[in-house]
Image: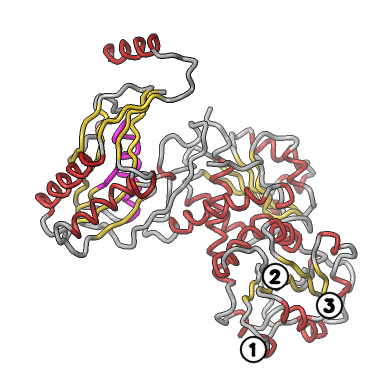
Amino acid sequence: MAELSTNHLLGIKYITAADIELIFKTADQFKEVINRPIKKVPSLRDITIANLFFENSTRTKLSFELAEKRLSADVINFTAGSSSVKKGETLIDTVNNILSMKVDMVVMRHPNPGAGILLSKHIKASIVNAGDGAHEHPTQALLDCFSIREKLGDLHGKKIVLVGDILHSRVALSNIFALKKLGAEVKVCGPATLLPKHIGQLGVGVETNLRKALEWCDVANMLRVQNERMNMSFFPSTREYVLQYGLNKKILDSLPKEILVMHPGPINRGVEITSDVADSKQSIILQQVENGVAIRMAVMYLLASKLKHA
Amino acid sequence: MLNKNVRLIFFGYFCDKDSSAMRRELLVDSKKIQIILHRLANQLIENHLDFENTVLIGLQPRGVYLADRIKSLLEQSYQIENIKFGYLDITFFRDDFRRNDKPLAANQTKIDFLVENKKVVFIDDVLYTGRSIRAALTAIQSFGRPSQIELLTLIDRRFSRSLPIQPDYTGCQVDAINTEKVSVMWKEKDGEDAIYLDEK
C-alpha cells in the first residue's frame, strides 16, 4: 500500500493527486465504520492529538474532535480566547509547551496564513491545518471533493463553480487546488471586487454572471461572504449581493439540468442560498458534514501511520 | 522452539543466498482443495444444520475467497438457502499499526446485519500467529454481541501461534518455519486453485 508523500497536511498545494486518492480510499472504509452500531476503532489508541483553535470554529472543531475520538486517540482542546496567547506568548512557544506534554499530532486553526507551515519547521509533531487565514482549509476541500465523487463518480472532467467571496476564502483556494489535481474543470463566480485579480493563473475560469456559471456547471459550491475578514465595503449592500449572487429555488429550477448544491457552512440563510435551496434534494450540505468526519479520520489515520512507534 | 531454530540454521546453510528467485513447493493441488472444501462444508452443516442462526464472515483480504467458495458450495451442492454472509476488514483493529514498515491498507467491510445472539463463523485462509483472529474478535463486536464465535481455516500453521487461538474447522495442517510462507491461490484471483510453500 502506498503512503502519504508528506508528514503534515498543511494544504492541498503540498500533496499529490495520489495522496488525495489514498485519503479517499481510506475515507470510504471509515464512512462504513461510522455507520456501524459501534462507531469506534482502536487504531490511534496510543496517539495524543491537540486541537489548537486560535480562531472560532464550530463544525470543523467538532468534526475533528469526533474523528479523533472515533479513532480512539486521546484529545486535548485549546481555544485562544481563554489562553496565555492573550498574555503575549508566541505561537511556537505555546505549541512547544503543549508538545512537552507528549502530544503526537496538532490540529490547528489560525487567523494568519502560513501559520501551519511556520510551525511545521519548528516542531516534530504532525500538523493538520484546519484553516489558516485566507490561505488553505485542506480537509474542507477533501471532503467537498469526496462528496462530489460520491454523488457523481470520478471528478475528471466534471464542472464545478465556486460562487461568492473567493478573495477571503480559504475553502476556495483549497478547493481549486484539489479539483484541479483531480482533473475537474473549475470556474469562480462572484462580484469582481471579491475575485482575486490574478485568480486565472491557477487555471480556473472567471465568470461574474451567476446564471451563466450555473448553466455551465455540474456542481455549485456556494461560499459564505466572510464579513469578518472585510475591512472595507466590497459590495453596496447585502440586498444587492443577494439579488446578484444569491441562489434561490427559482433560478435552480430554471436551469437546463439538475446541479448539485454545496455549502461549506456556516450558511447565511437568505444570503448565499435561500432556505428552500439549502433544504432541497439537490443540496448535499449535510452529506458534506457526515463525510467530513470520515475524511478527517482518514487524514489522521494516514498521518499517524507515518509516526513510527518508539 | 529449539527444533525450529535448528531447521532455520540448516535452511540458511543449504540455501543459495544469492538466488533472488523464490523456491516454491506445491503442498495441495486443485483436486485436493475441492475435497477439503466439501469436507469443511459438511462439517459446518453438521454443527449448524440449516444456518438459521449462523452467520459466515470472510476475513479481508484473503479469507473472502475461501468464504465465497464455502458459501456457494453450501448453496449449490447442499441446497442451503438464505445464508447470512459478510466480509470483515480488521485493518483498524490490528495490533501492529505504526510497528510495521509497510502501512496497512484497509479493505471493504460488508456486514449489513447485526450479529447479536448469532453464531458467527470466521473464515480465513491461513492461521499463523493468531493476531488477525484476535483483531477480528474485537472488530466483530462493533456489530453486536455474538452468542458464539468459531474459526474455520484452510491452513493451520501449527506451532506458530503467538496467542491462545485454535481453529474449530481445519482444511489441513502445515508445519512451516518463519522464513517460509504458505500461499493460497484461488482460480478467480490467481488463475489456479493451489496451496504452495514458498521459501524466500
Local crowd size for mark 1, using a 10 Å CA cut-off: few (<14), some (14–19), many (≥20): few
Determine the secondary structure under disc 2.
strand
Give left or right: position of A244 versus B94.
right
Give left or right: position of A220 versus B110.
right
Mark 3 belongs to chain: A
Of residues B149 and A148, the one drawn nearer to the viewer in this rendering:
A148
Amino acid type at circle 3 is Thr
Name the N-terminal-most of marks 3 and 1: 3
Residue A285 in the image: above or below residue A67? below
Determine the secondary structure under disc 1.
helix
Quarter holding the C terminus of chain B? Answer: top left
Mark 2 belongs to chain: A
Name the N-terminal-most of marks 3 and 2: 2
The residue beneath circle 3 is A208
Of residues A125 and A89, the one drawn nearer to the viewer in this rendering:
A125
Of residues A29 and B35, the one drawn nearer to the viewer in this rendering:
B35
Is residue A128 shown in magenta? no
Alpha-carbon distance for marks 3 and 2? 15 Å
Mark 1 belongs to chain: A
